[in-house]
Amino acid sequence: MNRVSPTFIPALVVMFAGPLLQGLSGASDPNAYLFAPVIAVASLPIGARQDLQASLRLAAMFFAIGALALALWWVGGRIGPLGGIPGWLPLAVTAAGAILAVTPGFLRR
């Protein structure tokens, strides 16, 4: 049975903060095509990363995560723009969450 790492939920929150920050920065492009693959691959269990025959599940994850990323960008755009958010910060925050999500799996090996 796959156990979820205690850092997984905080990692998801950090990863989804990226699209929200993208909207808060006032960016006209949601960049969901950047956020969705990073979040989806980081969210997969280690075994699924090695055996990607569950392509329908992966496709559904891309769709759902892309939709959520677009929704968060939209919400951030309605709240923002907030000055001082550099253009690189949203994707950097999502990448940091992805690293947080995958690190425990690699440390167990």
Image (cartoon, rainbow, N blue to C red):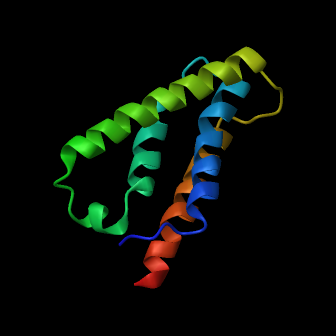
Is 89 rendered above or below residue 26?
below
Q: In which quarter of the image is residue 90?
A: top right
Percent coordinates x, y for residue 21 in the rendering: 69, 34
Q: In this view, does 34 lie to the left or right of 52?
A: right
Is 3 rendered above or below residue 93?
below
Is 42 rendered above or below residue 80?
below
Percent coordinates x, y for residue 102 in the rendering: 48, 65
Percent coordinates x, y for residue 46 in the rendering: 35, 68
Q: Residue furthest right?
A: 83
Percent coordinates x, y for residue 36 in the rendering: 43, 39
Q: Which residue lies furthest to the bottom in this view?
A: 109
Q: Is residue 78 left or right of residue 41?
A: right
Is residue 60 visible to the viewer in this orientation of the structure? yes
Q: Which residue lies furthest to the left in this view?
A: 53
Residue at point 37%, 63% (across, down): 45
Foreground pick, 12 / 21 = 12
Q: In which quarter of the image is the C terminus?
A: bottom left
Residue at point 53%, 62% (across, down): 101
Q: Is residue 41 left or right of residue 76?
A: left
Is residue 25 visible to the viewer in this orientation of the structure? no
Q: Quadrant of the N terminus?
A: bottom left
Is 52 rendered above or below residue 50?
above
